[in-house]
Image (cartoon, grey):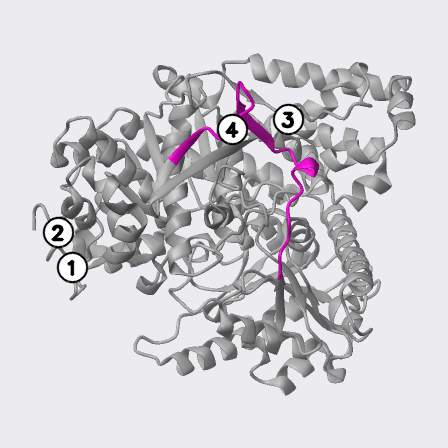
Amino acid sequence: MGPDGEAITVDDRRPPGLPDRIGRLWEFATDISWTWNREARAIFRSIDLPIWRQTRNNPVALLRGIGDERLQALTRNRAFLQRYDALCETLDDAAASESTWFGRRHPEFADSPVAYFCAEFALHESIPIYSGGLGVLAGDHLKAASDLGIPLVGVGLMYAHGYFDQTLGPDGWQEDADNPLDPGLTPLERLRAADGVPWLTWIYGSGRRIYIGAWRVRVGRVSLYLLDTDLDENDPADRGLSHQLYAGGVDHRLRQEALLGAGGVRVLSALGIEPKAWHANEGHAAFMMVERVRNLIRDGLSFPDAVARVRASTVFTTHTPVPAGHDVFSHEQMRDWTGEKFWEEIHQRDELLGLGLHPQDEGRDRFHMTAAAIRLARRVNGVSERHGHVSREIWRGLWGSRPAREVPIGHVTNGVHLETWMNEEIVGLLDACLPPDWQDRPHDKAVWRGVRELPAEALWRVRHRLKLRLLDLMREEARRRWREHWPEAAHLIGAGMLMSPYPLTIGFARRFAAYKRADLVFRDRDRLLALLSGPGRPVQLVFAGKAHPRDEEGKRVLQRVYEHTRDPGFEGRIAFIENYGLHTAHCLVEGVDLWLNLPRVPLEACGTSGMKAALNGVPQLATTDGWWEEGFEGDNGWTIPRAPDGSSEEEVDRHDHEHLFRLLEDEVVPLYYDRPDEGPWDGPPAGWLERARRAVEVAGARFTAGRMVREYVSDYYVPALRGSTDGDDPPTSTRSGE
């Protein structure tokens, strides 16, 4: 429903030249589920392959970019129409089927929505409203929920200026520019009230109303609603709230998170959606819970009863393994934002502010978003077994003197969406060696054991083609960036001029933060040079990633890495790919030979990039942190042992660097080049491919988003849908009950 109770409408953006005979192509293009439907992707590719590649696999831009003559020709192409009709029939059958995993397991909750709030979602590069792992995880969560038939609805923010476009200066310093989003080239659908009003609801902040519009993204069976304040009805200061992800200072962050949480609750109400369970993915969304408490108090419940009601139906997932990484706002900032009118409605200022108190705060005048979320969620979890342990240590103070082992914070180890991240050629190999229904039972470990029978020659040929595709992408992107951004041709050396597809190629791509240690390999230049240029056993490195615009230390790490790409001594054996995004990520995790992950233990909550690489037959070499502590089985990659307890940061770095190079020099490189007698490049390295197969097997059986979301359903969502209050006592230290 709209602001006055009228029906919501959706803007019609279908290209006028699209013939009715193939009109459902627009429906397919504006549903993100095409990204994991092989036949849909094949149909879009067949329409115009050059434009498909130019648009970076964007079907909306494809359909807007081809001429009417080509569209009409498709209506006369018998083979195309047969494929199109078959796809329509398949998708209609899937939509009509009630036999989903969730429907079979929990038919009583088939019409009980679960609301999933997150500050960022990564679904496709055409919608750049994500910065990294949190957004990719949230996007994969929605996709898996769609596959499983969970009645889930996502809530996020519509960042009209995206995250940012990364360009490196001649000295390697990151320069940040807006990356404006053109809704006309995305699957986003603007929602309006029946009379065309673009806002659905409002919140009160900084002494005035802030009107909120919404865009919808269809993700198969799931819908994602993105909140937008860039409306004519709003004060200019408020229009920018939804412009850019993680932009501005602390006050701006508070306003954005209030928009996400309180605004999201109100938008769902305006749409007539009544969630029975609520999931906050990270502390950014904690105001979702506070708003629901406020609503219940306003409706007549006491403060304790309102908190108990909200807790019973709420799940909270924390992703941050360091205390300083959690959002904190002063009470003065909270009061300035909400204004007196907010408190006049409920008369519960101290009680609500007390939800965010941390017992270690001496001044007791700060609102901790994660503390509030923990107090308002019956079920709380970290995102790996190790992270669950770290989270219990960080937050045990909320339970007084209780030992960390008894703190009721569990874990659900993250997973990645298999159909999104496994390359089609790898899928084709598995089709040939696994049971015909393997994709219908991806959680069956017995099925995945069949990967061990995957023919070495076939896997080696596919891996070679994927590396060629990566190198082609790097050269193409380097030429494009040179034309559009770079002031000097020397940039080409550092961006895409790797030697060839033959050397062992190591990939490192993630957010550039100091603790992730992208520069660890450069501690000993001579030793690295000897490794990369070994006679008959060359090695090359590919880096990619962005530093947060306000992370000066992360930018310095990135700069140090980039400087080595232009070092003549390395002769083009190190490359950096600018402006890392989902499209580049796919090519990297598919195309390199080895994935490198070097976080300082225990600062990596999970680290899912290695899972994506493993699904494509790329083993990982990593520190024993995040998911790798659970995922390393001895023969699916390599792990760096932990430094002795009590080591200083410098001692840890020295220890990890030494073990990294021992593994590379003594095990990784020799194994990759252990080839048959027919020549150093032609024959498949049997030992290496054994690890590649085991990487696929372990990741597929244990670390997919399907497994992750099934665990959320059984251990978190279903109890929340039942409103269960079974379990542990809530944390203490709110002001009403200190």
- Of callouts 1 and 4, which one flags the residue occurring earlier in the amino acid sequence? 4
- Amino acid under label 1? Pro
Question: For residue 178: magenta?
Answer: yes
The amino acid type of the residue labelled 4 equals Ser
Image location of residue 120, percent across then percent down: 49, 46
Residue 603 screen position, x and y as percent = 40, 64
Element assignment for label 2: loop
Mark 3, Cα crowd under 10 Å, few <14 / some 14-19 / many 20+, is few
Q: Which residue is drawn at the image coordinates 73% and 52% (left, top)?
A: 463
**Residue picked out by circle 3:** 436
Q: Is residue 429 left or right of residue 255?
A: right
The answer to whether residue 273 is visible is yes
Label 4 belongs to which residue? 223
Picture residue at 72% right of the left edge, 39% below the top: 58
* The residue stretch that appears in magenta: 177-202
Q: Dot 1 lies on which element? A: loop
Look at 30% across and 62% down and name the residue there: 323
**Relative to 721, is 126 on the left or the right?**
right
- Calculate the distance from the C-alpha at mark 1 to the C-alpha at mark 4: 39 Å
Which of disc 1 and disc 2 is earlier in sequence? 1
* Residue marked by disc 2: 733
Q: Amino acid at mark 2?
A: Ser
For marks 3 and 2, the one nearer the N-term is 3
Instruction: Find out whether the residues at labels 2 and 1 contact each other: C-beta distance under 8 Å.
Output: yes
- Of mark 3 and mark 4, the one earlier in the sequence is 4
Q: Are marks 3 and 1 in contact (CB under 8 Å)?
A: no
Q: Which mark is residue 189?
A: none
User: Disc 3 to disc 2, how far (Cα)?
Assistant: 55 Å
Residue 232: within the magenta? no
Give the spatial CA distance, label 2 vs label 1: 7 Å
